[in-house]
Image (tube, helix red, strand yellow):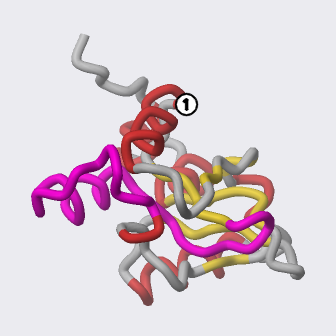
Amino acid sequence: MTQLVKDVMTAGVLTLPPEASLVEAARLMRDMDVGDVLVADRDRLLGMLTDRDIAVRSVAMGHNPHIMPVRSVCTPDVLTVRPDADSSEAMRTMRDHGVRRLAVVEDDGHPVGVVSLGDLARAREPGSALAGISAAPPNNGA
């Protein structure tokens, strides 16, 4: 049975404007319990920012996350997939480019979600170790 990206993706895109600070991004990720946000100017996708980007591209470099804008740290030229694409297409794109997440965008470029390696594992192989790890509650240091 064909599974479409829209059926396995995480919907309800979290976006930040390019001038938002990294602290704002980190707080949003914490509050929403996610590891990434899309950087967008209105409906135009400019990049993707992950918690790892904040740690490696900013904090580890000694930058001040209170004043550094997300546009300076996010990954530009985000790989995308359409919501009506087959999930196999998303898997191939991830494998071919060595990424764990794809922005899901409509034909007009409007972002509508993110599909992750974990999303695909839970949908395609629910008994796999990756699916189990992805479905587990986060370890918030408690």
Q: Residue furthest right?
A: 108
Residue occupying the point 55% across, 75% down: 91
- Is residue 45 inside the magenta stretch? yes
Amino acid type at circle 1 is Met
Q: Is residue 113 above or below residue 82?
A: above
Q: Position of residue 112 (x, y in %)?
A: 78, 59
Image side of residue 98 versus residue 131, left or right:
left
- Is residue 121 inside the magenta stretch? no
Q: Nearer the viewer, residue 3 or 96?
A: 96
Q: Residues within 10 Å of mark 1 (few under 14, many from 20)?
A: few
Circle 1 residue: 32
Question: Which region shows up in magenta?
Answer: 41-70
Residue occupying the point 47% across, 38% down: 29
Q: Nearer the viewer, residue 42 or 94?
A: 42
The N terminus, quarter of image: bottom right
The secondary structure type at the circle numbered 1 is: helix
Image side of residue 20 versus residue 69, left or right:
right
Q: Is residue 1 visible?
A: no
Image side of residue 5 versus residue 28, left or right:
right
Q: Is residue 108 visible?
A: yes
Q: Position of residue 123 (x, y in %)?
A: 62, 51
Q: Position of residue 56 (x, y in %)?
A: 19, 61
Residue occupying the point 56% across, 63% down: 18
Q: Position of residue 140 (x, y in %)?
A: 30, 21
Q: Is residue 59 above or below residue 131?
A: below
Q: Is residue 53 above or below residue 46?
A: above
Residue occupying the point 22% across, 18% down: 141
Q: Nearer the viewer, residue 114 or 39?
A: 39
